[in-house]
Image (cartoon, rainbow, N blue to C red):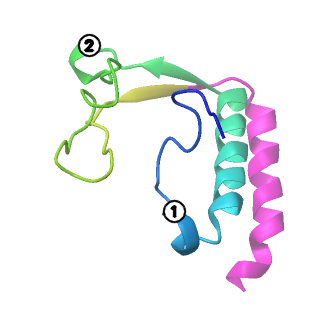
Amino acid sequence: MNLPEGSGTQHFAFGAGSRMCTGSHLAQREMYVTFVRMLVSLEVLPAIDPEHRPVLTGPLECNANPTGLSIEPKSFKIGFRVRDKERLRKWFEQTETATRHILN
């Protein structure tokens, strides 16, 4: 197979091959839904102090642990502003209803 440079798995957070996490697809779908809901309902704001903003130059420069096997982002701060309070309230209510049986 002739794949272009940079295609394929960009990380191995869930392992690889026969020892890959069996829940990786579910986890990725849950993260997707979470991030979409966050972006739809919240405005992401940069830190007021430029010193607290994330490093955006590349994966090596932003790594707080350059000697590790995985990337650990350097600390940064952000802010959130609610875009639609009613939509956010509804999503929290749906989540609580859907997971109520887990807590009992």
Rate crowding at label 1 as few (under 14), some (14 to 19) or many (20 or more) other CA atoms within 10 Å. few
**Who is closer to the viewer here, 13 or 98?**
13
Instruction: Look at discs 1 and 2 and give the one toward the viewer.
Output: 1
Q: Is residue 83 magenta?
A: yes
Residue linked to disc 2: 50
**Who is closer to the viewer here, 10 or 27?**
10
Residue that appears at 72% across and 80% down: 102
Figure check: 88 above or below 48:
below
User: Could you tell me the amino acid type at mark 1?
Assistant: Ala
Q: Secondary structure at mark 1?
A: loop
Percent x, y of residue 94: 83, 55
Residue that appears at 32% across and 50% down: 70
Q: Earlier in the sequence, mark 1 or mark 2?
A: 1
Residues shaded magenta: 81-104
Residue that appears at 47% across and 47% down: 11
Percent x, y of residue 60: 27, 31
Residue lying furthest bottom in this view?
Answer: 104
Residue that appears at 82% across and 45% down: 90
Do tag 1 and tag 2 residues touch (Cβ < 8 Å)? no
Figure check: 62 above or below 29:
above
**Who is closer to the viewer here, 69 or 49?**
69
Q: Which mark is residue 85?
A: none
Figure check: 42 above or below 102:
above
User: Could you tell me the amino acid type at mark 2?
Assistant: Pro
Residue linked to disc 1: 16
Q: Is residue 88 magenta?
A: yes
Rate crowding at label 2 as few (under 14), some (14 to 19) or many (20 or more) other CA atoms within 10 Å. few
| Marks 1/2: CA–CA distance | 38 Å
